[in-house]
């Protein structure tokens, strides 16, 4: 079992702490809470009508079907055939794209069309490429089974509960907020107020205190991890789309395997957004381990604090309109 699941299972076996909401974390952690509330993680899920996505969708023709949108949903039509789905939630912060999810009848459906921020256009949702719709219902999207939709909401929000019909959203806290990664906070808050130092540290999950691989596995619950029984040495070649899932490439990297200390939080502060245009910041992290000059005969002519990423963690486009940093660290 993964670290977070083990941790939550251990808590459930005791007094079953409850969720308190991200606002309760500001009492002791105002800096982290404020930064996290402005991060892309915090914006990973929003009601469709309240999101910027609602203003991006007007109409589009795709695969012979016409999609017309309003604040409540979309209708796909062709000649005399039409089908409609509600649009209830916007998945994604917009750093890459926004995808709408709603219901077709009583079933949850992922919409076939997404909005891509860099390209400023509507296009097919990842996972829908190569699927040619036959009916208007097919053109709307893909129906998601209950376990799948529960996982989707679980990774994009806090306080969700899997149910036979899919997921209980009655007390959902949209976005990846504090308790999504740290677990329910009531016991932790009570321990802090009682000044019980031992219980403070054991009543909440802090992945930064875990061994490197365990820490990566925590992030990988949503960002995906490879099959540990079948680690591929070149995952980006076996499956180009795997670069979307950073732990897959990272765990195939010699830096990760040899150092035993490289994890996601070595380079990324989970309380803030990625520094996409700050190569100098990430180069400093590289030089924390690779501070010496390149050896004789090395092609690298690095001097001072030059950008390491283009040669060792290239930027790739595994699917139209998407661009990711390849996390399998190597000499390209």
Image (cartoon, rainbow, N blue to C red):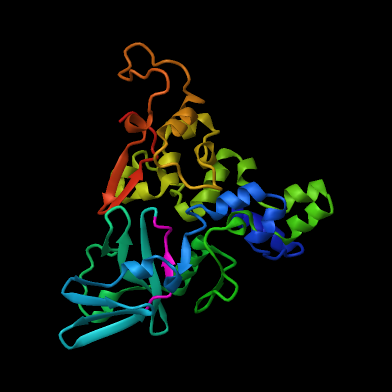
Quarter of the image with the C terminus is top left
- In the depicted view, which residue is nearer to us: 128 or 272? 272
Residue sitting at the far front: 55
Q: Residue at x 49, y 62 (%)?
A: 156
Q: Quadrant of residue 18?
A: bottom right
Q: Is residue 246 above or below residue 331?
A: below
Q: Is residue 307 above or below residue 115?
A: above
Q: Quadrant of residue 269?
A: top right
- In the depicted view, which residue is nearer to us: 238 or 49? 49
Q: Is residue 290 above or below residue 249?
A: above
- Does residue 220 belong to the magenta stretch? no
- In the displayed structure image, the side of residue 166 where residue 307 appears, left or right: left
Q: Is residue 119 visible?
A: yes
Measured from the top left, where is residue 326 in percent x and y?
36, 41
Residue sitting at the far top: 296
Q: Residue at x 40, y 42 (%)?
A: 276
Q: Residue at x 62, y 52 (%)?
A: 33
Measured from the top left, where is residue 100 in percent x and y?
38, 69
Quarter of the image with the N terminus is bottom right
- In the displayed structure image, the side of residue 97 where residue 274 appears, left or right: right
Measured from the top left, where is residue 49 in percent x and y?
43, 73
- In the displayed structure image, the side of residue 274 where residue 137 appears, left or right: left
Measured from the top left, where is residue 11 in percent x and y?
71, 59
Q: Residue at x 28, y 72 (%)?
A: 58
Number of on-image labels: 0
Q: Is residue 230 visible?
A: no
- Does residue 88 belong to the magenta stretch? yes
The segment highlighted magenta reads 86-94
């Amino acid at each position: 079992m993964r670290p977070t699941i083990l941790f939550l299972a251990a808590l459930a076996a005791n007094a079953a702490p409850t969720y308190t909401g991200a606002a309760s974390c500001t009492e002791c952690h105002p800096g982290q809470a404020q930064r996290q509330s402005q991060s892309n993680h915090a914006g990973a899920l929003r009601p469709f009508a309240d999101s910027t996505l609602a203003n991006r969708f007007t109409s589009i023709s795709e695969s012979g079907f016409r999609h017309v949108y309003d604040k409540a949903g979309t209708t796909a039509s062709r000649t005399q055939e039409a089908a409609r789905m509600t649009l209830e939630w916007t998945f994604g912060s917009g750093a890459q794209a926004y995808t709408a999810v709603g219901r077709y009848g009583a079933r949850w459906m992922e919409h076939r069309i997404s909005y891509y921020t860099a390209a400023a256009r509507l296009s097919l949702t990842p996972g829908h490429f190569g699927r040619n719709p036959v009916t208007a219902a097919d053109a709307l999207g893909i129906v998601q089974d209950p376990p799948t939709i529960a996982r989707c909401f679980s990774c994009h929000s806090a306080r969700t509960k899997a149910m036979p019909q899919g997921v209980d959203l009655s007390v959902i806290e949209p976005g990846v907020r504090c308790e999504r990664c740290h677990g329910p906070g009531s016991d932790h808050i009570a321990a802090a107020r009682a000044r019980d130092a031992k219980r403070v540290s054991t009543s909440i999950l802090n992945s930064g205190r875990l061994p490197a691989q365990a820490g990566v596995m925590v992030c990988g619950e949503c960002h995906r991890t490879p099959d540990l029984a079948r680690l591929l040495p070149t995952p980006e070649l076996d499956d180009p789309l795997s670069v979307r899932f950073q732990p897959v490439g990272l765990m195939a990297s010699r830096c990760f395997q040899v150092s035993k200390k490289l994890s996601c939080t070595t380079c990324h502060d989970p309380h803030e957004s990625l520094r996409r245009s700050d190569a100098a910041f990430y180069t400093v992290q590289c030089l924390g381990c690779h501070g010496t000059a390149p050896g004789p005969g090395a092609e690298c002519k690095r001097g001072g604090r030059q950008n390491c990423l283009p040669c060792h963690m290239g930027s790739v486009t595994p699917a139209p309109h998407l661009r990711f940093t390849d996390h399998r660290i190597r000499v390209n």
